[in-house]
Image (cartoon, rainbow, N blue to C red):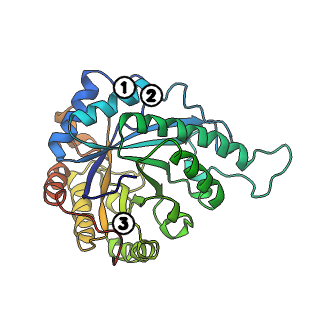
Amino acid sequence: MTTLTSYIGGMTWGWTGVRGTWTGEKADKSMELMASRLNVNWTAITLGAMQDHPQATEIRYTEEPTVTDEEVRSAIRKAKELGLQVVLKPVVNCANGTWRAHINFFDVDVPCEPKWSEWFASYTAFIVHYARIAEETGCEMLCIGCEMVQTDRREQEWRNLISEVRKVYSGIITYNCDKYQEGNVKWWDAVDIISSSGYYPIDNWEEQLDRIERVVAAHNKPFFFMEAGCPSREGSPNLPNDWGLAGVPSEEAQRSFYEAMFSACDKRDWVGGFMLWDWPARLYEESDASANDDYCMFGKQAESTVRAYYTLKTNQPVKGAAGK
């Protein structure tokens, strides 16, 4: 198993992985600009596959709109050419728009109702498929799930899935739990690195880091934020996970969030880095940056904030866990 030895100065690339968008000149230029503008040393190649609704048990990862396997391999090759380490991050979404955190089934099987066993069989096939690609292409890390709050309690199913993944993949395994859920996952010992989504209000970082620190120390595992970020929109620093929040575009709001997040985390040497959210495969024109109110910081004030911080941090070693 590969171990984490340096700070993760990363950016999520390519979400949601729409078929036909991950190859060609525009996709290459997007990744090149991400690497050069932000001075990242890692990227999360991140794709979504669909199930129909939260109680569906079939994940259709070979169908549109999900990117093809060759597009995935091409994106990984491009990242490697740019000298980046790679997390492959396959994610399941619900086609009806329901957030994946609400995927859920009865704890006790009921005849004629969808079952956890059926869903985990499909989900395991989905993750193992991409684990094979991660092994084949030399991805340093694999993220086996993202913000799947209602599934977190199914401890044995997750342990079984991780066992199947380790049969085909030899790199680092992490699971991206949702914000506020770090202490609710009981199977952290089965993964190599604890990671979570860092969408905490701008004035609440110290309190949340105190809480997360206790979890990380208890499990004696490295930790990083597999997601973190804030839209460039007035009001977003107070609710950075709400991508639909009403507000006018504001580069200053986004920059202030990053400054606060980095300042708070810089005091905690157990925070092993960030995989920021996010950088699309099809960038907007830089001249339109001030009018763009999404998470991407291309051409915005936060771009220089991230670059300066990553330039400072990416040569630093990572501690094993909080207090260790």
Within the image, what quadrant is residue 311 found in?
bottom left
Of circles 1 and 2, the one toward us is 2
Q: Secondary structure at mark 2?
A: loop
Q: Secondary structure at mark 1?
A: loop
Q: Secondary structure at mark 3?
A: loop
Viewer-closest of 108 and 205: 108
What whole-number distance in Å separates the C-alpha atoms at marks 3 and 2?
Answer: 33 Å
Judging by the rendered image, the residue that carries numbered circle 3 is 201
Viewer-closest of 252 and 118: 118
Q: Dot 3: few (<14), some (14–19), or many (≥20) neighbours within 10 Å?
A: some
| Residue at x 49%, y 29% (from the top left corner) | 66
User: Upstream in the sequence, badge 1 or badge 3?
Assistant: 1
- Amino acid of disc 1: Thr
Q: Position of residue 32 (x, y in %)?
A: 20, 34
Using the rendered image of the protein, determine whether residue 16 is visible from the camera's viewpoint: no
Q: Position of residue 302 (x, y in %)?
A: 20, 52
Of circles 3 and 2, the one toward us is 2
Within the image, what quadrant is residue 89 found in?
top left
Residue 282's place in the image compared with 292, above or below, is: above
